[in-house]
Amino acid sequence: MKFVSTRGQTPPHIFSEAVAVGLAPDGGLFLPESLPDISGRLGEWENLGYADLCFEFMRLFATDLDPEVLRGIVAKSYGNFSHPEIAPLRRLGERLYVLELFHGPTLAFKDFALQLLGNLYEHQCRVTGHGIKVLGATSGDTGAAAIHGLLGKPHTAVFILYPEGRVSPLQERQMTCTGAGNVYAIAVDGSFDDAQRALKDIFGDREFSAQQHLSAVNSINLARVLAQCVYYLFAWLRIPAAERSNLEFVVPTGNFGNVFAGWLLSRMGVPVAGFKVATNRNDILHRLFTTGEYRSGTVTPSLAPSMDIQVASNFERFLSYALGGDAKKVRAVMEQIIRTGVWRFESFDRTAFRSSRADDAEISEIIRRVHAQHGYLVDPHTACAFKDLDPTRTSVVLATAHPAKFPDAIRAATGVTPTHPALEALKVRPVVKYPLSPTVAAIKGFIAAR
Ligand SMILES: *Cc1c(COP(=O)(O)O)cnc(C)c1O
């Protein structure tokens, strides 16, 4: 299996190469050259546990890895989850299920992809014989998940920049209280955008990034998308057969990464009635799916901070399919979006998608109502998904974070303060962070010295 860039100006890459480089050299995102049809395998996969299912799925794509090596990487990645089912599906009502994706080390769904990516990187270091320095900027969950994907791994170091004072205290503890010697949580004196800009310049210096073996952690790595397909498949296989074709996955969304993975899976011969894209007040995707127009706006902080995004970086993958794989058109549209911030679909097949938007008051009200009706606590991101459920369909809501990560919002809505032992344990560990100014020179110097 080969992977091609959405912009069509990169030669096809094998899995390991596409994972190693992340972004395609032509600035595009990698997609499989063709999608396998897995409809004939679903019966035999029905009773597989999570790691076995993940292995069977990933081996269709990671064809350049020895299957036994891949099996080991997958087993290790999901060995760190605290729930025996890895992604348990809970039934809340007649036609309502919640897929809990928060039992990984950092209690958010990003662990599904970043545990796997960390182990793929580790394998790569072993094969190539050189170390790797992973660099990223975060406004919260991604940084913590990336750090925990690489924690203590030999020949790897992880540098995560975050805006000092602007991530939640628990998120900061997840990054700074790991006790691992290869983790550098860098508290920059500036905003997330300042950190992001500095990173862009550092990666733009090809000589420096090659010499330091830098790799980017961000939401666009191909391995992340494929790893995320697996929990949709796992959930689908656990829904009673009679309900499967009338099933709607409901997905809290920021970068369009998570919901894109589900949609991609549905194109491999897994019948699903549709997807609901659930946004908070930063509703670029809700506006896209209701009007056909993609228009970036300014970000307003919300109760669901990991969805405070107005540029959906994985959108380009969807666009590529929507434009029939025409790389020239993709380039023209992306160029227009970068230049003007707006793009309108001429003809847009939206049948697979619905969308909704929840503002902060609605998020609180939903947290209260779901707790009152079902005795179940949802975090503010997951709460967005409960807006406008379709009563004629079976809904599978993806729960993207554990409620204990957002105790203040939950307490305000319900009077209950959720806790989790992993978070309590962090509170007694020392904080290790590295204050830096978000300048290219300061960050480069820091990285080169380690
Ligand atoms: C990252 C994140 C999201 C948004 O995921 P996308 O893949 O960017 O759509 C939603 N909820 C939580 C808790 C997250 O950490």
Image (cartoon, rainbow, N blue to C red):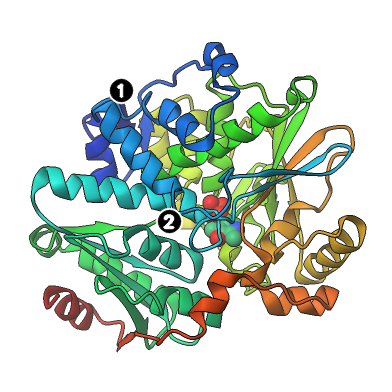
User: Residue under circle 1?
Assistant: 1
Label 1 vs 2, first from the N-terminus: 1
Return the x and y of residue 80 as percentages of the image width and height. 45, 54
Disc 1 packing (10 Å; few <14; some 14–19; many ≥20): some
Looking at the rendered image, the quarter that the N terminus falls into is top left
Which residue type does callout 2 highlight?
Arg
Distance from the alpha carbon under mark 1 to that under mark 2: 34 Å
Which of the 4 image quadrants contains residue 182? Answer: bottom left
SS under mark 2: helix
Which residue type does callout 1 highlight?
Met
In the image: residue 198, left or right of residue 404:
left
In the image: residue 193, left or right of residue 5:
right
Disc 2 packing (10 Å; few <14; some 14–19; many ≥20): few
Return the x and y of residue 197 as percentages of the image width and height. 33, 71
In the image: residue 221, left or right of residue 207:
right
- Residue 80 in view here: yes
Ligand 1's image quarter is bottom right
In the image: residue 345, left or right of residue 250:
left
Q: Is mark 1 within 8 Å of ligand 1?
A: no
Return the x and y of residue 430 as percentages of the image width and height. 40, 87
Which of the 4 image quadrants contains residue 89? Answer: top right
Return the x and y of residue 14 as percentages of the image width and height. 24, 30
Looking at the rendered image, the quarter that the C terminus falls into is bottom left
Q: Nearer the viewer, residue 301 or 217?
A: 217
SS under mark 1: loop
Which residue is depicted at the point 37% across and 46% down?
A: 76
In the picture, the disc for residue 126 is none
User: Residue under circle 2?
Assistant: 339
